[in-house]
Amino acid sequence: VQLVESGGGLVRPGGSLRLSCAASGFTFSSYDMSWYRQAPGKERELVTSITSAGRSTNYADSVKGRFTISRDNAKNTVYLQMNSLKPEDTAVYYCYAKRYSSSWRRIDYWGQGTQVTVSS
């Protein structure tokens, strides 16, 4: 099982980045997908999630209207489009996959993270 994030980097305030997370080794279309982030000295926080078929999304208040999550189940990939970036968006961004088995056991996977730095 692998979740491989890409697309991070250094961007100026007000700029944009698009993160990708390529999944392999499991049935991607059966999993809800999320992006989390962790800034230095802070706890990991949920940024956004999308359901397995992509019909429903939710966002942290801090990123609503600026970030958009999407997925392509044919490509086993989830994306995070980040616009109007702010210095406080600086963090390591992690991809997360989750589903529940028929006995309600949680099955989940994490990516290794990609650094996003917003600075002038």
Image (cartoon, rainbow, N blue to C red):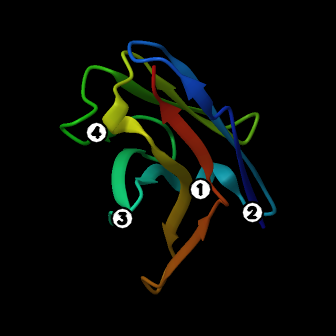
Marks 2/4: CA–CA distance: 25 Å
Specify the farthest residue to the front. Answer: 120
Task: Return the mark for residue 26.
Answer: 2
Please report whichever mark, 4 or 1, sits nearer to the chain's N-terminal start: 1
Specify the farthest residue to the left. Answer: 61
Mark 1 lies on a secondary structure that is helix
Residue identifier under label 3: 41
**Image-quadrant location for residue 65:** top left
Residue identifier under label 1: 30
Near mark 3 (Cα within 10 A), the count class, few <14, some 14-19 or many ≥20, is few
Marks 1/3: CA–CA distance: 33 Å
Q: Amino acid at mark 4?
A: Tyr
Above or below for 98 versus 79: below
Marks 1/2: CA–CA distance: 9 Å
Mark 4 lies on a secondary structure that is strand
**Image-quadrant location for residue 9:** top right
| Labels 3, 2: front one | 3
Residue shown at the point (40%, 18%) measured from the top left = 13
Q: Amino acid at mark 2?
A: Phe
- Assess whether mark 3 and mark 1 are in contact (beta carbons under 8 angstroms): no
Near mark 4 (Cα within 10 A), the count class, few <14, some 14-19 or many ≥20, is some
Quadrant in which the C terminus appears: top left
- Assess whether mark 2 and mark 1 are in contact (beta carbons under 8 angstroms): yes
**Front residue of 86 and 108:** 86
Near mark 2 (Cα within 10 A), the count class, few <14, some 14-19 or many ≥20, is some
Task: Return the mark for residue 59.
Answer: 4
| Labels 1, 3: front one | 3
Marks 3/4: CA–CA distance: 22 Å
Marks 3/2: CA–CA distance: 32 Å
